[in-house]
Amino acid sequence: MHRAVRPRSSVSEELEVIAPSKLAIENVSKNFQSASGPVLALDRVSLNVAEGEFVCLVGASGCGKTTLLNIIAGLEKPDSGRVLADGKPVIGPGRERLVMFQEPALFPWLNVFGNVLFGLKLKPNLTRKDRHDVATYYLELVGLSRFERANIHELSGGMKQRVSLARALAPNPRVLLMDEPFAALDALTREQLYGDIQEIWQARRKTIVFVTHNVREAACLGDRVLLFSPHPGRIHEEFAVQLPRPRDINSVDLAAHATRITKALKSIGQAEPIAAK
Amino acid sequence: MKRFLLAAAFFAVLVLLWEATYRAKIWSPVLLPSPRQVVSYLESAAADGTLFKATVITMRRLLVGYLIGLVMGLPLGLLTARWKLFHDTIGTLALGLQTLPSVCWVPLALLWFGQTEAAMLFVVVMGTLWSVVIATETGVRNVPPIYRRAALTMGSKRLHMWFKVILPAALPFIVSGMKQGWAFAWRSLMAAEIFVTILTGFGLGQLLHYGRELSAMEQVIGIMIVIIVIGLLADKIFFSPIEKFLHRRWGTSQA
């Protein structure tokens, strides 16, 4: 019996839409040492994220949502509990779960194309041509083909975040972790990116965990919005947002959802000083 | 072009002032020769080959010593940035020795190595090494942690992390350290050549020294000009292009 061996990893294979991951966060706790003693950043947080789901974590700053994101990424270790990705425990960072940070963590010593190539060069079994074709594809996807030779400092804030998105997407991760990626952008640029990220999410089928303190943004993007309460960081309440996509951030239906979440967020804010006493 | 003409005019005025001072006979011509005398010394020294030979000898000492300094300094800087133990030991040593003017190594080098090339090399290496160690360490410590984290998630680790992330990110610091090391090495080599007569070859510093011994001021000034020109050329040919690249890539302000 002789079977023809298919050539390894062509570009089409690399661009194939792969199955997104299922995440299970089980009883995760994390302490930090601060000047005024230990702070419980996360208190036995449990959460399931389905394959291809878009989940938004919302809360005031310091409520542990970024810490949770870092733990899912494998950049930080929980003090107790664990994170499972497709049933396998997360023990360190890996290219199955890529992170997009708030400040664009683009490398200034590489140009735009070099930045997108960075993760691809770390992926085995890709030829030089494959990597170039894949990087070109994603730069086109985020609408920056014209700028592939540009230096990072020549880009506007919105363009930088698009490059970050292309860089995070290029190694074809199963999960995309986004840590307030649009917080530093102006409103107009942000609205464009809401449209782009929804389009890309539908085209590329990723599981997305998105951290933000902007309730409207969360309602616009998430299938589910999880509201965090601080000190200790816990999931306070969960909201399902069942609106058709693509969603417009300015729509009335969306505003209704946002109002509901904001109300809950405010109630935490009011309860907190009393609880602290 | 306009900038070039202005600069050329500036230097022409300098030479004219020099010539005027010479003609005013304020100082004895033994102390202040005319520009023409200096040029004719340089011409004759160039014609009989002394100038060329001395320049080659000096540049060889400088380049070899500088390269040794770089090759030792970079890894040492990485070690001190990476491990506390090296930071507390070699890092502290580097900080201390960097404050020592590198001319101060000359007496020690002479006693240890005698009138040899090794003594010259030693002084140049000591001039280069500590600046490079400190700049590399500072550069590595100033790499924003977010670059590391981003690279980690993309699967970079160990050697790949060092060579593709940390070193490139630290490059602006490292280059300025290399430049400082070069300046220190150049100064200390000149001092060493002036103080030490070495039988294995006469460098520019030695020509300067003999100019003084013979009270040949045109030789002293001529050699000084050669030394200045070499310093300028090193900057324009070697460091300027690297710095221009860094400015372009990083977007830092261009002087």
Image (cartoon, grey):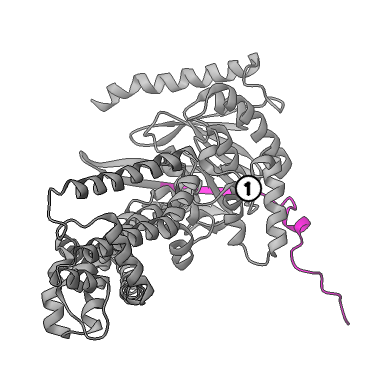
Query: Is B250 left or right of A124, judged from the image as shown?
Result: left
Which quadrant of the view contains residue B76? bottom left
Secondary element type, mark 1: helix
Query: Is B40 left or right of A186, judged from the image as shown?
Result: left
Q: Which residues are magenta?
A: A1-28
Which quadrant of the view contains residue B228? bottom left
Q: Is residue B148 magenta?
A: no
Which quadrant of the view contains residue B229? bottom left
> Residue B219 location, x and y as percent?
24, 66
Can residue A139 be seen here?
Answer: yes
Label 1 crowd bin: few (<14), some (14–19), many (20+), radius 10 Å? many
State the quadrant of the C terminus of chain B: top left
Q: In this picture, is A101 found above or below B152?
A: above
> Residue A232 location, x and y as percent?
34, 36
Q: Amino acid at mark 1?
A: Leu
Q: Which residue sits at x=70%, y=65%?
A: A127
Q: In this picture, is B84 found above or below B68?
A: above
Q: Which residue sits at x=27%, y=61%?
A: B37
The chain containing the residue under callout 1 comes to A
